[in-house]
Amino acid sequence: MRKLEERIFKVFMIGATTIVAGSFFLIVFTILKKGLPAMNLDMIAQVPQGGYYSGSGGGVLNAIIGSLLLAGGASLLALGISLPIVLYLNVYLRKTSPLGRLARLSSDVLFGIPSIVYGAFGFMLMIYFGLKASLFAGIITVTLLVIPVMIRTMDEVFRTLPREMMDAAFSLGATKWEVSKVLVLQSASGILTAVLLSFGRAIGDTAAVMFTAGFSDNIPSSLGSPAPSLPLAIFFQLSSPVEAVQARAYAAALILTFIVLSVSIEVRLIGKHLKKNKI
């Protein structure tokens, strides 16, 4: 009976793994099949030319740079906010602290809120402060979106560290601030993973930037300029009835996938280097 039960659950696990892996490869195959024919140097080296959305020449360089600025700026700002919060929860507060439990519960709730809600909230803030759709407004909104992701990920990383390491540091007379610096060094690879997850969430989100960052055929020249993004560029191109423009949408999706994959591989390599050198 036990062997039969084990075999049944093994079949379920293999089936679930196959479905997830198959879905991933199917998505990548579809993007490659439809995007590669439309991919050329102009797609990544030029901004949209006149009549681009009716089939004329140009590319999505404006959206590539806009997405990198939005996601990169939001990830760095979220790191500066999230890291002190996580250190406070794990070093300065006791595990049984009601404030710590409330903070973690709030983070989990914020993690599950749809991005369209963050976009609406960011839009409300824009109206209240008299701001226009811009790179600055987009970064602020996306930062609010990725802070729960970063807090949740880094908190799990910090909680996996041996408690004995902190106790040993305190027994040697280290202050809580000095212990915090040790934890950051020991968790460097985990912090990078949190930044990666936040960057991936930020660069692929559409709803949050649709209301706040705006869109333009030009490269953002300042924080007050509209910031185009690849997800919105894909959406606008897929909405076109012209087949050539729709094909460019898949090429833009291929570029977005390549960016996320490149960042993922780079961070994994950095994480392995840090572990190897015990930083």
Image (cartoon, helix red, strand yellow):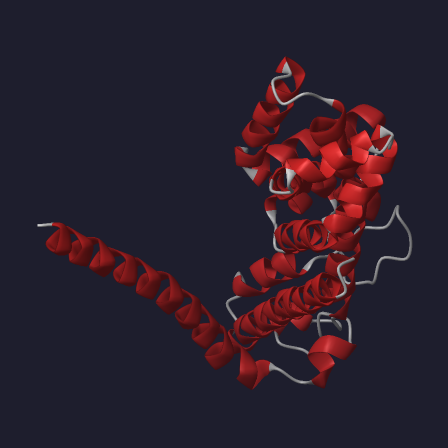
Above or below, 233 against 223 in this view is: below
Residue projecting furthest to the left: 1
Q: In x, y percent, where is residue 152? A: 61, 38
In-front residue for pair 177/76: 177
Q: Is residue 87 above or below residue 41?
A: above
User: x and y percent of residue 49 in the render?
Assistant: 75, 73
**Can residue 58 be seen in the rendering of this structure?**
no
Q: Residue at x 67, y 49 (%)?
A: 194
Q: Quadrant of the C terminus?
A: bottom right
Which of the 4 image quadrants contains residue 159?
top right
| Residue toward you, 103 or 210 | 103
**Residue 248 makes an appearance in the image:** yes
As displayed, is residue 104 above or below residue 9?
A: above
| Image location of residue 83, percent across then percent down | 77, 38
Residue 65, picture quadrant:
bottom right
Query: What is the quadrant of residue 154 in the picture?
Result: top right
Nearest the camera: 159 or 168? Answer: 168
Q: Is residue 22 left or right of residue 7?
A: right
Please state the horizontal and vertical placement of residue 86, each as a whole percent of the image: 72, 34
